Amino acid sequence: MHVLDKSRGYEHPLASEITPREVYAARRDWLRWMATGAAGAALAAWAGREAWAQTAGPGKLPALPGTPSKVPGALTMEKLTAYQDVTTYNNFYEFGTDKADPARRAGSLKTRPWTVVVEGEVRKPGTYDIETLLKLASMEERIYRLRCVEGWSMVIPWVGYSLNELIRRVEPTGNAKYVEFHTLADKAQMPGLNSRVLLWPYVEGLRLDEAMHPLTLLAFGLYGEVLPNQNGAPLRLVVPWKYGFKSGKSIVKIRFTDKQPNTAWNVSAPHEYGFYSNVNPTVDHPRWSQATERRIGEDGLFTRKRPTLMFNGYEAQVGQLYAGMDLKKFY
Ligand SMILES: Nc1nc2c(c(=O)[nH]1)N[C@H]1C(S)=C(S)[C@@H](COP(=O)(O)O)O[C@H]1N2
Ligand SMILES: [Mo]
């Protein structure tokens, strides 16, 4: 509900109607405007500290603040998808295939203690504790579009740091060409593992240069708080120019290899899901078009679908990674 302010002649919401999420979004928009340079670098830095100290997430989970990322392309100005939608409309097949299953069932996921094994073609393999990973590099806020291969999208404010911060520290050998991500597969905690929709564990992979790209995010939080279980707590990958399934949730192992990994979706339906899976409006899924997408939260009787952008709108940042490749062949 909005009221008319007669003295100013336009509508504004009553203070009592402003939710914490709207306060968050308003601060975020203001902060991003400051960070665009309009307000000057020094002022932006000051604004960052002040606004970040005050920023409240939805308040359900422990706070995990990050400073606005300086990585090119990392802060889209688009309207954020509501926290409610981001956390109740999920794909996390380990908890069931219905969009509502993860929010309903992932409460059983134990996120402490948690370790990530780093192995394969690296000079410094090892087992990294979640507390160590949380402190490994400084936390950044990244606001990314997320495009699911099913034809819907969201805009999500993640908190984390570039995966390359971790990769650099483990020192890949000259043989490391690909990175494999294994996510948790524990039947005691994950009822969806009884189904044969996929071969468990859920494995995904990237080429090493894709994994090293600064936009490839190791995410620990969203909306200024730690990740809700249904979004892949305590840590997950976010690769914004690829279909969402490339971004594995609840990662337990990172393996460096010289061979292209067999990934869960590619193994289950190779003609439908390729290893690359870059968002591409000109390469359709065999069963549906990828030219447009439905932005979650915008659905309405007269809402038009949005055009899907090449590399999900990150072409300027990542197009070079695929120079000379036939993207119809390497889908
Ligand atoms: N372990 C695991 N990771 C996963 C999935 C999954 O089923 N299991 N689904 C993927 C798909 S298809 C998408 S679209 C995104 C959804 O992330 P979100 O629920 O946080 O928006 O997670 C990806 N990561
Ligand atoms: Mo997806």
Image (spheres, grey):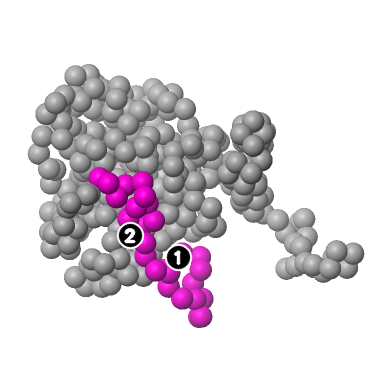
> Circle 2 sits in a helix, a strand or a loop, which is it?
helix
* Residue at the spot 30% in from the left edge and 22% down from the top edge: 169
Q: Residue furthest right?
A: 7
Q: Quadrant of the N terminus?
A: bottom right
Foreground residue among 75 and 315: 315
Q: Is residue 204 above or below residue 256?
A: below
Type of amino acid under label 1 = Arg
CB-based contact (under 8 Å), mark 2 and mark 1: no
> Circle 1 sits in a helix, a strand or a loop, which is it?
strand
Q: Residue furthest left?
A: 259
Foreground residue among 194 and 249: 249
Type of amino acid under label 2 = Met
- Which residue corresponds to mark 2? 310
Q: Position of residue 195 (x, y in %)?
A: 21, 57
Residue 146 lies left or right of residue 261; in this view the side is right
Q: Quadrant of the C terminus?
A: bottom left
* Residue at the spot 24% in from the left edge and 33% down from the top edge: 253
Q: What's the magenta region?
A: 293-321
The quadrant in which residue 121 appears is top left
Q: Do we see residue 131 in this rendering?
A: no
Label drawn at residue 295: 1
Q: Which is more foreground, mark 2 or mark 1? A: 2
Label drawn at residue 101: none
Foreground residue among 181 and 321: 321
* Residue at the spot 24% in from the left edge and 28% down from the top edge: 117
Residue 70 lies left or right of residue 265; in this view the side is right
Q: Is residue 236 above or below residue 119?
A: below
